Amino acid sequence: MKIFLAKILFIVLVGCILGEIIARVWHLNSDIPQRYLDSHGIQKYVPEQTGYWKGGSHQWHINKLGWAGKFVDSNDSLVTIIGDSFIENFMNPENCHQDALLKNHFPQVKFLEAGRSGVSFIEALEIADELDSLHVKLHLIYVNNEDFTESISNLNRHSDIMQVDLEQGKMVPAVMKMPGLKKILYSCKFAYYLYNRFGSSKILVPGRSDKNKIPTTKSDQKERYTSQLLAYVKEHYQLSNKVIIFHPSVSKALKAQVFKTGFKTIALNSDKDKEWTFVYDHHWNCYGHSQAAAQVAKHLKAGRLL
């Protein structure tokens, strides 16, 4: 019996080793960078990490500021690009990122991306405030409908997202979920592959968000709290150096609310166009990113913002 169990254990061990080698060589999973909470309560990636997107078609890099993409070594004419997984954009190569595409339209301007899956509207503003130390000329903040409702803890508390409590008028910092377990799981590529195939989907992969799983809230309650959120934002943040860029799906009512608050805004439009998104994913493909950048550049030039 002991010999039989030893053989079984040996076979399992060899299988795990071979599985780990195959998972790493063929990049069966998308590599996931480790996160940390900075002194401002903002979730960032541990600097100077590198990894591959699933399949190994391209690589991502985390710069010394803790964001995906290249670090800009000069703050002269610096423009930041802030957002969630659409800006993080691990699923596309670097030449299909907003910073590279906008650079083609404005060669004299330096662009710096600060994107991470799960970033709410209020956290994007906090990120912008932190980056102001670099003497930023303009912040471009890309948003969806959910980025506003997810900013409000009074609607639904999301412990892993930075929010604001509008009743108490204070920020509610995010909490890292299962950092130890994630570190172990992401380090063992074969185990993570099996987890993705057969396990729970609670631990998110890069670019995947649970934003579409928000519990239903009455529309009038959302509108009331969104108005309160924008009033809070107007009181606590500088608006003049920020441009809010709406995804094509953002409602007209929300666009009007944000514009009325005093923000400069740009509304992206994908109507009567080729598909902007991947077949298997709701994020923009390279074509979608190029179209978005072209529209943003057109509006920035028309408004003489750059």
Image (tube, rainbow, N blue to C red):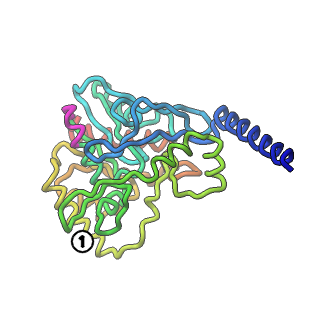
Few, some or many residues within 10 Å of mark 1 (<14, 14–19, 20+): few
Q: Is 198 situated left or right of 109 in this image?
A: right
Magenta stretch: residue 130 in it?
yes
Question: In the picture, residue 107 is in which quadrant?
Answer: top left
Q: Residue 74 location in percent, x, y?
A: 26, 23
Q: Quadrant of the C terminus?
A: top left
**Residue 276 visible at all:** no
The one nearer the camera, 248 or 153, is: 153
Question: In the picture, residue 172 is in which quadrant?
Answer: bottom left
- Which residue is pictured at 38% across the width and 30% down the height? 63
Q: Name the residue beneath numbered marker 1.
A: 224
Residue most toward the front? Answer: 2
Q: Is 78 situated left or right of 22 in this image?
A: left
**Residue 191 visible at all:** yes
Residue range (magenta) = 129-136
- Which residue is pictured at 32% across the width and 38% down the height? 297
Q: Is 158 situated left or right of 224 in this image?
A: right
- Which residue is pictured at 49% across the width and 51% down the height? 208
User: Overall secondary structure of the magenta stretch?
Assistant: helix
Amino acid type, mark 1: Arg
- Which residue is pictured at 52% across the width and 57% down the height? 202
Magenta stretch: residue 266 in it?
no
The one nearer the camera, 258 or 305, is: 258
Q: Residue 247 location in percent, x, y?
A: 38, 53
Circle 1: element type: helix
The one nearer the camera, 238 or 264, is: 238
Q: Is 266 situated left or right of 10 in this image?
A: left
Q: Residue 243 location in percent, x, y?
A: 25, 46
